[in-house]
Amino acid sequence: MSEDNQLTRAQRDDLRTVAGMIVPASDEYKVPGADDPAIQADIVATLGRDTKLVTAALDHLARLAGGPLAELAAARRDAVAQAFRKDGGGAAATLVRVVLQCYYRDDRVLRSLGLELRPPFPKGYVLPDGDWSLLDPVKARAGTLRRAP
Amino acid sequence: MAESPGKRRGLEEEVLTKDPVDVLIIGAGASGAAVAWSLAETKMHILCLEQGSWMNPAEYPSTGRDWEAKFYGEWSSSPNVRGRPEDYPINDDSSPIKVVNYNAVGGSTVMYTAHWPRLHPSDFKVKTLDGVADDWPIDYDALTPFFEENDRIMGTSGLSGDPLSPLTHPPMPQQPMGLSGAIIGKAMNKLGWHWWPSDTTVATTDYEGRARCINLGHCTPACAQGAKSSTDITYWPQAVRAGVELRTHCRVREITTDETGMATGVVYYDKDGVEQFQPAHVVIVACNGVGTPRLLLNSKSDRFPNGLANSSGLVGKNLMFHPYAQIYGYVKEPTDSNRAPPTCLWSKEWYDTDLSRGFVRGYGVQFVRGAGPVFEAVVSEQKGILPWGADHHRVFRKLNGHRLGFSAICEDLPEEHNQVTLDPVLEDSHGIPAPKINYTISENSRKMMDHALARGREILETAGATDICVNSPIPWGGWHLLGTARMGTDPKRSVVNEWGRTHDVKNLFIVDGSIFVTSGGVNPTSTIQALALYIADQMKSRLANLFD
């Protein structure tokens, strides 16, 4: 089975639903939710070594929900999500991390945060040298290095 | 040799044997590179076997948009998570601090913060000064010329004249203070506490063929610019040009010995997984404080049934990690986030013993500039300060780009129950028994960590920080692997003598962090390399009677 087919349809549906609960879309900040199709596609395409734990997390989520997460009433869905976040262990943490690492590299999200759409290399960043007179009180106070016999 | 390794193991297949070399170095990291470079001038035939490969900076994380995601996988600092073919697994289930390292030409200097303090003179005399642990058999002055030489070759930046640190002469100016440094400096001044720009191995000007730092940010997992010094771009090119042979993808299984108790060479697996025997007149181990005891314990024989060079029973014992007490928070003004090397300033305010604090010895502090957006989101969600749902966006914008951090490097005292042994089950990809870590944080270290967290909180609150979070210890913070083949003059209480030769095997040397007697409260790489250069110098001056 190819990597992008390692989740079942039901698991993908639950992944999309829980991702949207973690990071919903916002008109105020002009950003998509983590259930956005492009972000979901990125998540599924790059699961790689995390597939096993994410699958385990989704199995756990399905057990808690007892059915498709999206079909639960809002209050029940929130309760399931809370239980998942509280007791899901390393698998749940991996799922949340996978969602966030794909969400926070999406162009629309980075633009909203005022970040440039590029890797750090080769342009890098400029750092202010700062006011080194701030060190003057330290120099004035001096101090003594502990001597060794 | 009394018997070939193959026969000794009862194997029928032929073990391939090569021509002997004068000096065989195991490991091409911080110390292996330094000792190779120094010995090269002898014109002896020097061979280094390295289980990893040469690195390709074009593949470093900062070259891609998914740079932060890579830290959770192939560029994790944990070999157990990373799982590259060059890595070996480590059972650290019985330790609150997990081992982190890197296996390649350059070793863990490929993946480190480049923070560059030295041990202090007082660190070599802790028994005399404070009545704990042991004094080193050498003092700071013995290492001074080698610190200086190492700083020149690695290429350090910093500001000379720190009143609370040993005098250094960095060839390049200190890193920019940046936004984060200014906030920290003002807070420290309000509190009247010591701070100073850190010495680092980040090039702030073009230096010896290395381009200056352009603030790629996350320089811990390798620098695509080459501004961060790692031995694959400093010592090794010079050593190879001087004639040292470096053989990669060669994992050493054991050091062999003859009937007189002298080392005869090593058995290793080459890049194709074929077992080879490499004879040598001198063997130098440079595998770090976990890899070195692992190799010695795996080198059992009839003559050395408890592992090689282990008549003291101390190989693997006295493991010191430096428990990190980390505290961080968020200020209103922007910080440098991921747009700069992570460390910029240090403090030695609490470095020396003051028994009124409730513990002996002390800790150094490194201040941390900030984090990138993915790391910020993931960690803050785990800490429970970044909510799910509609408020996620507002809170994230309050946190992202506003983090300041304080990490205390607490001096771990040697305790024999903290140790590296061989796991009875776990093996690496060549079937070599893997190391197992048993480690607990002492009460003294706990008190030190709590003290540091309280001071860190004062600093952060003085800077106006809120949402303060703690990692104590940093779980994946086992960078500093020290003490597991300690140095000393008494063969019953140490593994190597005062110039790095094992007491038991007169042509076997150890040059890495495992020979530390005590750990100090600073990042150890500068001192590890100075020690390696010192031992190489001792060897060169004793060549006529090296084995007496």
Image: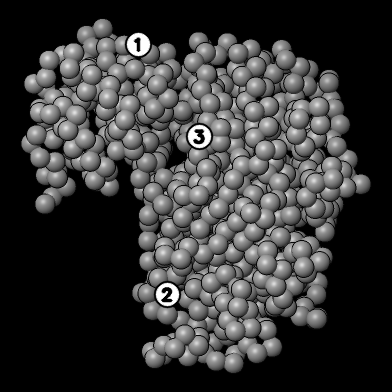
N-terminal-most mark, 1 or 3: 3
Report the residue marked by disc 2.
B270
Residue B214 numbered tag: 3
Label 1: chain letter: B
The mark lying in front, picked from 2 and 1, is 1
Residue at left offset 56%, top offset 26%: B327
Does the CB distance between marks 3 and 2 fall below 8 Å?
no
The mark lying in front, picked from 3 and 2, is 2
Q: Considering depth in this image, is A130 or B533 the residue closer to the camera? A: B533
**Which quadrant holds residue B505?**
bottom right
Residue B129 lies left or right of residue B37; in this view the side is right
Residue B357 in percent (x, y) is at 77, 27
Residue B394 numbered tag: 1
The C terminus of chain B - image quarter: bottom right
N-terminal-most mark, 3 or 2: 3
N-terminal-most mark, 2 or 1: 2
Question: Disc 3 to disc 2, how far (Cα)?
Answer: 38 Å
Residue at left offset 59%, top offset 37%: B324
Name which residue type carries label 1. Answer: Arg
Share a chain, discs 3 and 2? yes
Residue at left offset 56%, top offset 75%: B299
Q: Is residue B56 above or below residue B64?
A: below
